[in-house]
Amino acid sequence: MPASLGLRSDAVNDYLISYIRHITVHFLLDDSTRSMVKSWVMNSSTTNKVIDKVGNAADTVAAAAIVGTNVASNSPVAQVASSAVSPTFSPLYQQIKVLILQRLQSGEWKSGEMIPSEVELGNRFKVSQGTVRKAIDELAAENLVVRRQGKGTFVATHHEDHVQFRFLRLMPDDGQPKPGEKKIIEFKRLRAPAEIARLLSMKSGDSVVFVKRVMSFDGAPTILEELWLPGVTFKALTLERLNEYQGPMYGLFETEFGTRMIRATEQIRAASADDEVAQLLNVAQMSPLLSVERVSFTYGDKPVEVRRGLYVTHHHHYQNELN
């Protein structure tokens, strides 16, 4: 409650302490509903937590009143605040980030397209250019937009070189990552097994697309993968299209199915090659392999792919960056 309403300073302090205590409990509860840390996040999950709590804009307005900051009553942030139900606080630039993400999710700005300038966005959202810049800085750090010197800011696409390998963490020991050669072993539509359905937030028995393929680098089979995709989203995907497409698979999903992967989690274990795997990867039976299970998400934290891979690491290593 703002001090300007006539409350004593100790009452204001009690309000703020109570508010901070609520925030702490909220995040502890959030964490308790998610699986414990046993995977690496390819992209900031903060983006998805924030976009699912658009109502938090009300707290920006409330917080602005507490610290004496003005928020335009006709700004999108204030308009969103009118329907807010959660008391969780989020800084103003985070609210602008949410609004930009909403437009990316709705397709207002498509992959590869230039978004409005910081000045234009500031005018649209009734905030300063600096606030917009901070929001875009985070989006760029999360590889959702790309700044190009002298040209502007563009929606990131999986077709760009520096983005193509963001989800491929297997690196050659002697150089930079390079595109692999793919060979489809199996392609079919079937009903989702219970575990796959759970990971894709579907019902057991719902339609899924199953793809099994081998990825080779410099002619050496290196990755054996099984992919599971929601059947409704990828209804038009065919074996012929996969075989003829030469770019990154996520690029195909993005341009032809309107599904952009923005983050992923992975679980990594040690494994060994059974007879079938050994033949497909051209290694000795019982050879040590790296087992990687990935769940990839699009906007709104919606899972749209389960990928299980076995990696040969004779000349490659798994690389991750911890910030």
Image (cartoon, rainbow, N blue to C red):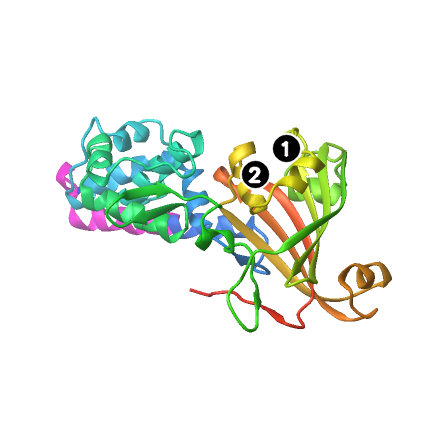
Say which quarter of the image contains residue 244: top right
Q: Nearer the viewer, residue 96 or 30?
A: 96
The residue drawn where x is 67% and y is 59% is 216
Say which quarter of the image contains residue 116: top left
Q: Is residue 302 visible?
A: no
Q: Which residue is mark 1?
A: 234
Q: CA distance from mark 2 to mark 1?
A: 8 Å
Residue 18 falls left or right of residue 269 = left
Residue 108 falls left or right of residue 169 = left
Q: Tag 1, which secondary structure?
A: loop
Residue 274 falls left or right of residue 249 = right
Question: Which quadrant does the N terminus fall into?
Answer: top left
Can residue 21 be found in the magenta stretch?
yes
Q: Amino acid at mark 1?
A: Phe
Dot 1 crowding, Cα within 10 Å, few <14, some 14–19, many 20+: some
Q: Nearer the viewer, residue 29 or 21?
A: 29
Residue 16 appears at what percent x and percent y? 27, 49
Residue 211 appears at what percent x and percent y? 72, 44
Which stretch appears magenta?
Answer: 3-22
Q: Is residue 294 visible?
A: yes
* Number of dots carrying numbers: 2
Residue 47 appears at what percent x and percent y? 42, 46
Dot 2 crowding, Cα within 10 Å, few <14, some 14–19, many 20+: some
The residue drawn where x is 24% and y is 38% is 117
Residue 206 appears at what percent x and percent y? 72, 32
Q: Are marks 2 and 1 in contact (CB under 8 Å)?
A: yes
Q: Amino acid at mark 2?
A: Phe
Q: Is residue 176 above or below residue 101?
A: below
The residue drawn where x is 21% and y is 36% is 122
Name the main secondary structure of what is drawn in magenta.
Answer: helix
Q: Tag 2, which secondary structure?
A: helix
Q: Which residue is mark 2?
A: 253
